[in-house]
Image (cartoon, rainbow, N blue to C red):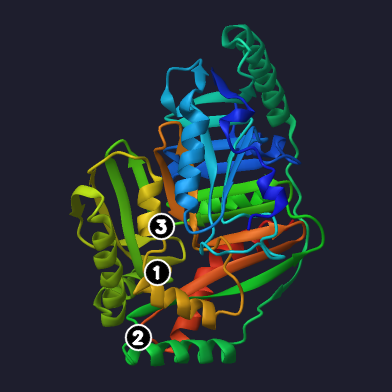
Amino acid sequence: MEPAEFRAAPLHRRYGRLLSCSLPCSGLSLAGFLAAAEGQARFYWESPDGALAFAGMGAAVELTAWGDDRYRKISVSARELFADSQFRGAANPLAGPRLFGGFAFRSDFTPDNTWSIYAPAFFVLPHYQLASSGGRMWLTINAQISPEESVASLIPDLQVALREKIAELRAADSKAPTARQSQLSGINYPMSYHMWRQMVSSATERIRAGELNKVVLARAAELRFSGPLQLPPILRHLTAQYAECYRFLFEPRPRFAFYGASPELLARVQGAHIATMALAGSIGRGANEVEDQQLRQALLDSRKDRYEHQIVVDKMRERLAPLAESLEVAPTELLKLSNIQHLQTPLAGRLKRARGVLPLVEALHPTPALGGDPRPSALRLIRSLEPIPRGWYGGPVGWIDSQLDGEFAVAIRSAVAQEARVWVYAGAGIVADSLPRLEWEETELKFRPMLDAHSSCVL
């Protein structure tokens, strides 16, 4: 049953029509925009290498959903929201309104202390939205108006509000002091290596017994700070160190934030065109070019990693078959990040029927790269073995535009923050010949991006 605070959120167009107005702008930065939004709801998305970026502040509309049909519910609510909306201003569709949010890893997720403000599906349409692409920027204001209000009469007022906000943001950006991070006072790992070894051993026994082929197990680290966490320095660090990743922030309530830098695209849909990737199999980076090349070759030659990766490729292709008119599976390649390298296989094609991004997200999540295979058996085993709920870790996070197209990443290399506490997550794919010590070391490697982002930003 949905808690009262989520049931009370505005979900349907009966609360008013959506009116969006946009103006081109220059001289703004995403970092400055997010810093100016301190104390409000904040949202951020940037695709690899900064080709496309969005940021939002405030909340014009919130959409939530619970249960096994949460994808359908969000799709219906989003369609209703945008059905009779009006968009005025910049002709570029990138400036148009879009929802930011995501889904919990499990459909039966129940908010707990760590994830107290999150629903199993939670999306927000920001009040102000900044879009950036190819050196051009647009600021958009989103507002709900009553059915009797005249769109034409409101546009001049919205344009005035936009110009005032642009001037305000430019002024704030030019004199904004560098945010000082609170001191990191401690790191706690709730799961000991002994507990991890028992968990992995139990999983490999089940796999060898034929119950399943693969399962992904995760653990967490808790970080404590001397005061409320400052997010802009962390996001700047992630941008500088992980430009090849999808960087995101979902902060629907001030100081309650989910953020990260994920290398894994779950689904991108534009009309009938689709793209996704299989990402599984990992190894570290070398201290020099020779060592790096040796590690690269070791990953490519690893029977365990190639097997784990092929499970993901095969299952993704299988799940896309009912939706795709055509599907191309590219050759497996290496994705190199600053601290780790992965086996990666891009997939792209065309949908039989263009219905937006959410049907694809539902079909793919969780991929064997974050859940396992077969999916039902893996999810049951994760629930029975993992002592800490995943919340939104490993779930789909991204955006949806007015056509219901969009882009979602798998929320790995992520953290959830509440005031002065942060929880960071990392997982490893377990197959029959997995060794607990090596899988433990893999999670240590995957913790590093977020641990470094938090420790290096302490002044």
Residue at 60% from the left image edge and 11% from the top image edge: 155
How would you rate the neighbour count of disc 3 (Cα within 10 Å): few for under 14, some for 14-19, many for 20 or more?
Answer: many
Q: Quadrant of the C terminus?
A: bottom right
**Residue situated in front as seen by the camera: 112 or 54:** 112
Report the Cα–Cα distance between label 2 and label 3: 27 Å
Tell me the residue that label 3 is attached to: 264
* 401 sits left or right of 3 in the view: left
How would you rate the neighbour count of disc 2 (Cα within 10 Å): few for under 14, some for 14-19, many for 20 or more?
Answer: some
* 300 sits left or right of 70 in the view: left
Tell me the residue that label 1 is attached to: 288
Q: Residue furthest right?
A: 226
Q: Is residue 126 above or below residue 225?
A: above
The residue under label 1 is which amino acid type? Asn
| Image quadrant in which you'd find residue 184 | bottom right
User: Can you give x and y, in whole percent of width and height, for residue 98 in the image?
Assistant: 51, 34
Secondary structure under the numbered disc 1 in the rendered image: loop
Secondary structure under the numbered disc 3 in the rendered image: loop
Tell me the residue that label 2 is attached to: 211
Q: Nearer the viewer, mark 2 or mark 3?
A: 2
Q: Is residue 142 above or below residue 352?
A: above
The disc, 2 or 3, on the residue closer to the chain's N-terminal end is 2
Contact between marks 1 and 3 (CB within 8 A): the answer is no
The residue under label 3 is which amino acid type? Glu
Report the Cα–Cα distance between label 1 and label 2: 42 Å
User: Can you give x and y, in whole percent of width and height, for residue 355 in the image?
Assistant: 34, 40
**Residue situated in front as seen by the camera: 273 or 354:** 354
Secondary structure under the numbered disc 2 in the rendered image: loop
